[in-house]
Amino acid sequence: MIKVGDTLPAVTLTEFVAVEGNGCSIGPNAVNVQEAAAGKTIAIVAVPGAFTPTCSEKHLPGYVAQADALKAAGVDEIWCLSVNDAFVMGAWGRDQNVGTKVRMIGDGDAAFAKATGLTLDLNGKGLGLRSNRYSMLVKDGKVVTLNVEGPGKFEVSDAATMLAQAKA
């Protein structure tokens, strides 16, 4: 499992872009994790799936509400990752009114989850391989903090914990 001090994996994720510009077409666009994280401080929050009850009612809304405070504490971007495709992540972002506060990034084939060792096997529940619920603070592509939730928990990966860590 990825740990504090490790570099983010060299994987490509996808993000739905609804506005054409800067060479980006409308639709899913590739996000090279290492390139996108270079030189930035990023709060990454990962959830088992878009539109799930805890993720939609508590996790993502907390990051949207704390986005300005996180940015004031030095966070350049907030990424929400899930083992969903870019279209689902884009739809969830619109449903949750994230606007430009949080980048909704799809890990469609679980490449990031697998590379970090932060997978959650929900095959027995018909949901396949998912991502654990966690948050991490990343500076210039290196993990500074990592808060991994236990199964069915929501105690350490919330926006308030991330804000305290960003201020530290």
Image: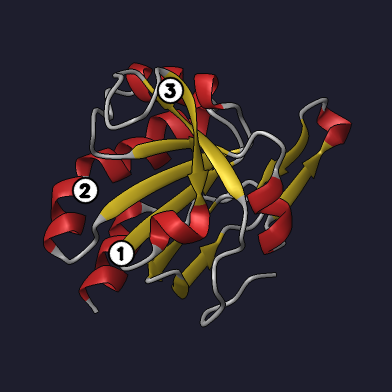
Label 2: how many Cα within 10 Å (few below 14, some 14–19, many 20+): some
Mark nearest the camera among 3 and 2 is 3
For the point 34% across and 59% down, which residue is it? Answer: 42
Of mark 2 and mark 1, the one earlier in the sequence is 1
Label located before the other in sequence (3 or 1): 1
Disc 1 marks a residue whose amino acid type is Lys
Residue toward you, 127 or 140: 140
Can the viewer see residue 97?
A: yes
Residue shown at the point (48%, 37%) measured from the top left? 105
Q: In whole angstroms, how far apart are the C-alphas of marks 3 and 2?
A: 20 Å
Q: Which mark is residue 90?
A: 3
Tags 3 and 2 touching, CB below 8 Å? no
Question: Whole-percent x and y of residue 93?
Answer: 37, 25
Secondary structure of residue under mark 3: helix
Residue, disc 2: 66
Q: Out of 144 and 21, give the one closest to the viewer.
A: 21
Q: Real-space Cα distance between discs 3 and 1?
A: 23 Å
- Residue most toward the front? 23
Identify which residue is drawn at 61% across, 30% down: 84
Measured in 3D between alpha carbons, the distance from the residue under mark 2 to the one under mark 1, in whole angstroms, is: 18 Å
Q: Based on the displayed image, in which of its 4 quarters is residue 90 positioned?
A: top left
Bin the neighbour count of mark 3 within 10 Å (Cα to Cα): few under 14, some 14-19, many 20 and up: many
Q: Closest to the observer: 139 or 50?
A: 139
User: Would you name the residue on which mark 1 appears?
Assistant: 40
Image quadrant occupied by the C terminus: bottom left
Choose the circle earlier in sequence order: 3 or 2: 2
How far across and down, in percent of the image, does residue 140 sit?
38, 71
Q: Is residue 7 above or below residue 35?
A: below
Confirm or deny contact between disc 3 and disc 1 (CB under 8 A).
no
